[in-house]
Amino acid sequence: MARKKGQTYTSQQKAKVVIELLSEAQTISQLATQYNVTPKTIQNWKKQFLSNASRAFEEDVKQSQEEIAKLKQENDALAKTLGRTTVERDWAVGKLKSLGLSKKDLVDPKLTTLPLTRQTALLGISRSSLYYKPVPLSDTNLAILNRMDEIYTDNPEYGYRMIYQHLLEDGYRIGNNRVLKYMGILGIQALYPRKKRNTSIRQKQHPVYPYLLTGYWHKTGQKTKAVKVDTPNEVWSGDITYIRMNGGFMYLAAIIDWNTRAILAYKLSNSMDATLATDVLQMALKKYPAPKIFNSDQGSQYTSHEHTQLLKERNIQISMNGRGRTIDNIIIERFFRTLKQGEIYISEYHTIKELKEGISTYIHKYNFKRFHSSLNYKKPMNVYLDFIQKSA
């Protein structure tokens, strides 16, 4: 639910929201509904928070504290000048010490010495806002989003018209324009060259690198097929996909070894930004030797300075899909499809903790217990680790 026009938030309130986001106990959509603010705004707050986190350890913290104390004194003096009663002043000062709460949370309906009308006036909010509750995504709309997710995973070549017809056949009442809009929310598109949305939105100011895996592909008739990379740890592939929850979406970033299909690192997060992609890359590089090539799409998470710089520092060649060519990163796209069909769609997760545990269990099974036909029915991580040990 979007915040009301003119509504502002203090730095303490913003920090509280960001800290809750980083705890990953709720999806970003749930937090947006709870605090009556857009998901994009919360993302911006997180970016600002992380970029200024180091200031907490600098000497200017003392100066900031002095400024806060000075402002408090000025507020007290202003209250006296305006003729506020002692009860009003004591109430306001006491409440404003807990700035981590929203303004509505500061209202005390049991206070007999200060009526609600006066409390709301002091806080600068309308009394009617006390009784307003943001409307979450309806069960019907959420069901449509979930069904679209299933249809697309089974039929990645479907565009919005085909998904629209499928939904009509399933008995949903929906227009094709809303289907197109929901595809944008989910970040899905038909698997043919076109601009990818949401999870692969590029930043124009970020440099884009060429696709280096051309030599690993060949054409047979009208079909393009992947040629097996001969050596493990030669090419890593990274990508991000969405995982649906009742209260919104989580985002899963993963890195796969192109040759063995082993999942080398992954992370589930309630927000999708450069930090997510970089964290997963750092996790993989701490555990395994650096590859020759790292391939990804042109999303801003992978073209960011933080991510590309980390690759350059390890002398890893940077490869990026052709614009709109999801198929260029088909190895990890296939893994995400397997994960959703083999775990996500057949499970019911009530909390993010349950989702994390489910994904962790499945990836362990995928790496160490699941046979893979392209490996002559060996297990991905067993093949990968065997190669690493022999190469050491």
Image: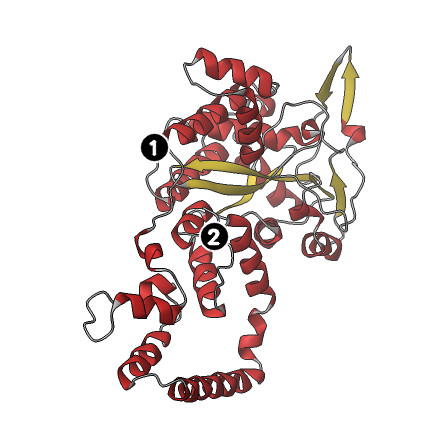
Question: Of helix, strand and loop, which one carries label 1?
Answer: loop
User: Residue 197: x, y in percent?
Assistant: 64, 35
Which sits earlier in the primary sequence, circle 2 or circle 1?
Answer: 2
Q: Which numbered tag is attached to residue 348?
A: 1
The answer to which image quadrant residue 57 occupies is bottom right
At 66% from the left edge and 37% from the top edge, which residue is drawn? 232
Viewer-nearest of labels 2 and 1?
Answer: 2
- Residue wearing tag 2: 3
Label 2 Cα neighbours within 10 Å, binned few <14 / some 14-19 / many ≥20: some
Q: Is 172 drawn above or below residue 389 in the view shown? A: above
Q: Nearer the viewer, residue 43 or 177?
A: 177
Q: Nearer the viewer, residue 55 or 286?
A: 55
**Residue 63 makes an appearance in the image:** yes
Image spot of residue 112 (x, y percent): 18, 72
| Vertical order, 230 against 41 (above or below) | above
The residue lying at 55 percent from left, 20 percent from top is 176
Q: Position of residue 236 (x, y in %)?
A: 66, 40
Q: At 67% across and 29% down in the image, what residue appears?
A: 326
Q: CA distance from mark 2 to mark 1?
A: 31 Å
Name which residue lies at 70% across and 35% down: 231
Q: Is residue 142 left or right of residue 305?
A: left
Q: Quadrant of residue 58?
A: bottom right
* Visible residue check, residue 229: no
340 on left or right of 52: left
Residue type for callout 2: Arg
Q: Is residue 290 above or below residue 225?
A: below
Q: Secondary structure at mark 2?
A: loop
Q: Position of residue 159 (x, y in %)?
A: 61, 20
Q: Residue furthest front?
A: 83
Q: How is the image coloured?
A: secondary structure
The amino acid on which the numbered mark 1 sits, given as a three-letter code, is Glu
